[in-house]
Image (cartoon, grey):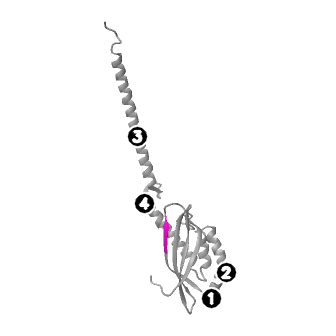
Amino acid sequence: MKTPYKNIYKVLGQNRFMVLSIVIAATTISVIALLLVLKLHNDALNKAFIVNTEGHVIPLKLVDQKENLEVEALAHLELFHNYFYAIDPSNYESNLEKALWLGNSSVDALYRQKKEDGVYNRLLQYSLVQKVLSIKSKIVLDSEPYSFETKTVFEINRGSSTDIYELTTTGKLLRVDRNFPKNTHGFLITDFFENMLRKLDKYEN
C-alpha cells in the first residue's frame, strides 16, 4: 500500500544533512573571519601612520618592539647620566633641570641631598669641570618596571689635577607618555640609587 509518508526518513535525512552542512559552513566562515580580524589587528600593531603635508595618511612599519624598547631605554639612561653627572659651573643648573624631568622623586631626593652637602657650591667655588667619559648600562626587560644597573666613568678636572671615578647606579625604568622635548623616550627613572663610587688609577676606553 502506497503512502505519501513512505519516504519520511529519507526527507529527514536530507534535512539533517542540509542543516549540518549549513552549520559547518557557518562555523568555517566564522573561524576564517576571526583569523582575518586577528591578522588585521596584529598588522595594525606593527604599523604607525603619519599625515603628510598634503593630508595623506601614510603607514610606517615599526621595528621589532622589544629591540626598539631596549634601544630607547639605553638612550634614556645615557641621556640622564650625561645630564646629571656631566656638569660644570656654566651648565649645571640647566643640565640638572633636564635630568629631573627624566626621573621621579628618588632622583629629586638625591639632587637635594647633594645640594645640601655642598656639592654644587664646591663646583662653583673651585670651578670644577666634571666630564663623563663613558656610560654602560644593563637592563632587564622581563617585566615592567625594568631594573637597570649603570656604570658611569667620569673625570673631575680641578685645574691642577684630574681624577677619574667610576660610579655604579641602579634603579628601575617605568614607561610613561613621551614629552617633547623634556622626555623624548617616554621613560621615568624610579628607585634611583648611587651604589658605589671608586677612584680609578687609569682609564682605557
Query: Can you tell which mark lies on residue 64?
Result: 4
* Circle 2: element type: loop
Q: Earlier in the sequence, mark 4 or mark 2?
A: 4
Q: Position of residue 190 (x, y in %)?
A: 59, 67
| Cα separation between marks 3 and 1 | 74 Å
Q: Residue furthest top?
A: 1
Distance from disc 4 to disc 2, alpha carbons, whole Å, reads 45 Å
Residue with the mark numbered 1: 126
Q: Which mark is residue 117?
A: 2
Q: Residue at the spot x=55%, y=62% of the render?
A: 145
Image point 60% across, 82% down: which residue? Answer: 90
Q: Nearer the viewer, residue 68 or 195?
A: 195
Disc 1 and disc 4: Cα gap in Å?
48 Å
Q: Residue at position x 34%, y 9% from top?
A: 3
Span highlighted in magenta in the image: 136-140
Numbered circle sitting on residue 31: 3
